[in-house]
């Protein structure tokens, strides 16, 4: 798979990120007048801002229509626990559309250079000879200069085999962390709750932007897990065959929460899989699961936890 978007400038990428940010802000009905004024100023600053925002709105509209066009999804009745009253899901379309905007990679399309679909795990050769393999539903942005090689992992997971160019450090930026290769091969997973860095060759150094946390060096055969809530990093030995099972379309888990398993299943599913409650999401699962086959993975989960699955068009609900 060839590396696309060489003609996208840094200024356009910045504008794309700003447009995505304004899409989210403008979807909040309680947005302050000051924020709305800043938005108008941003639109007036450059005609390109207006064009880019219009493109972002079109992507948002595609997400909204994807929800509204499925009767099985829009006509379902749900009963919120707080009120006990049934609510037609069409009333929640505005909220769901914002979620779908991200689930369908809407924001990432505005700034990514490469996006892997739900049925793709592409291997890319970068301009310096390094290789990157993306997990399904993952996205990266590439920023190479004469002095530095920077990859931003915007979503998902990727494995990097880095070409040695001592004078041009190779860094993967993921969330608030920067992972710099020390002549190495390594894997980075940007999860909902944590960030995982697994080293299969040589070492990497992880630095945390805007934090007093000291840099962390991770050696071959080790995995660093940064907990987003606790702001803590734990480094421990890891079996690389287990950590990289995703490259074979599997995950190997030992006492992992169901939420983690569902997150990995969602990478390969064109709709959305949700867990009905936080208590169920925290139930623990162990085993090797073929996440590329949604039906097989759901069968494993239902047998392991004794839960039920309800399908509503593109939506799958796991419940007790």
Image: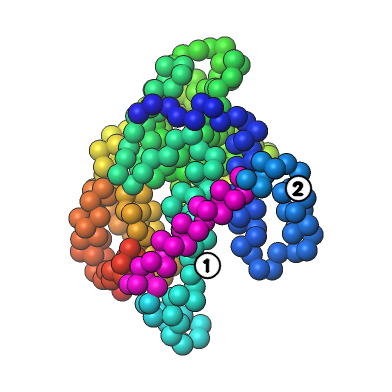
Q: Nearer the viewer, mark 1 or mark 2?
A: 2
Is residue 26 found left or right of 3 in the rendered image?
right
Task: Say above or below: 23 vs 91.
Answer: above
* Label 2 packing within 10 angstroms: few (<14), some (14-19), many (20+): few
Residue 143, by quadrant, is top right
Q: Quadrant of residue 184?
A: top left
Secondary structure under badge 2? Answer: helix
| Near-viewer residue (281 or 79) | 79
Can residue 196 be seen by looking at this rendering? no
Label 1: which secondary element: helix
Q: Quadrant of residue 131?
A: top left
- Please name the residue shown 38% across and 66% down the image: 69
> Which residue position holds label 2?
44
Magenta highlight range: 52-74
Along the viewing direction, whichever of 233 and 244 lies nearer the viewer: 244
Relative placement, left or right, of 60 versus 12 is left
- Left or right: residue 256 versus residue 249 is right
> How much space separates mark 1 and mark 2, taking CA atoms?
28 Å
The circle drawn on residue 176 is none
The residue singled out by tag 1 in the image is 95
Residue name at image x 38 percent, y 77 percent: 75
The residue sitting at 20% across, 55% down in the picture is 296
- Asked if residue 231 can be seen in this view, the reply is yes
Percent of width and height locating residue 288: 24, 48
Quadrant position of the C terminus in the picture: bottom left
């Amino acid at each position: 798979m060839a590396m696309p978007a060489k003609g996208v400038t840094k200024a356009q990428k910045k504008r794309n990120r700003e447009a995505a940010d304004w899409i989210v802000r403008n979807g909040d009905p309680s947005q302050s007048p000051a924020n709305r004024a800043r938005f108008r100023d941003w639109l007036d600053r450059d005609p390109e801002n207006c064009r880019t925002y219009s493109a972002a709105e079109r992507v948002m509209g595609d997400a909204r229509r994807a929800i509204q066009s499925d009767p099985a999804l829009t006509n379902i009745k749900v009963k919120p626990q707080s009120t006990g009253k049934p609510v037609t899901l069409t009333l929640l379309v505005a909220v769901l559309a914002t979620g779908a905007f991200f689930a369908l990679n809407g924001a990432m399309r505005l700034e990514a250079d490469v996006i892997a679909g739900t049925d793709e795990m592409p291997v890319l050769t970068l301009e310096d000879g390094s290789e990157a393999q993306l997990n399904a539903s993952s996205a990266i942005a590439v920023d190479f200069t004469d002095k530095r090689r920077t990859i931003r992992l915007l979503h998902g997971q990727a494995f990097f085999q880095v070409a040695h160019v001592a004078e041009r450090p190779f860094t993967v930026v993921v969330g608030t962390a920067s992972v710099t290769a020390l002549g190495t091969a390594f894997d980075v997973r940007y999860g909902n709750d944590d960030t995982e860095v697994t080293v299969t060759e040589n070492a990497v150094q992880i630095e945390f932007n805007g934090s007093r946390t000291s840099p962390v060096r991770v050696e071959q055969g080790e995995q660093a897990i940064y907990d987003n809530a606790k702001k803590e990093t734990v480094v421990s030995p890891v079996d690389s065959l287990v950590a990289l099972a995703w490259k074979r379309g599997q995950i190997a888990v030992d006492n992992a929460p169901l939420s983690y398993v569902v997150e990995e299943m969602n990478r390969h599913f064109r709709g959305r899989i949700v867990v009905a409650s936080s208590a169920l999401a925290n139930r623990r699962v162990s085993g090797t699961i073929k996440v590329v086959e949604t039906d097989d993975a759901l069968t494993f989960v239902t047998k392991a936890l004794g839960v039920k699955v309800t399908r509503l068009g593109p939506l799958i609900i796991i419940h007790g």
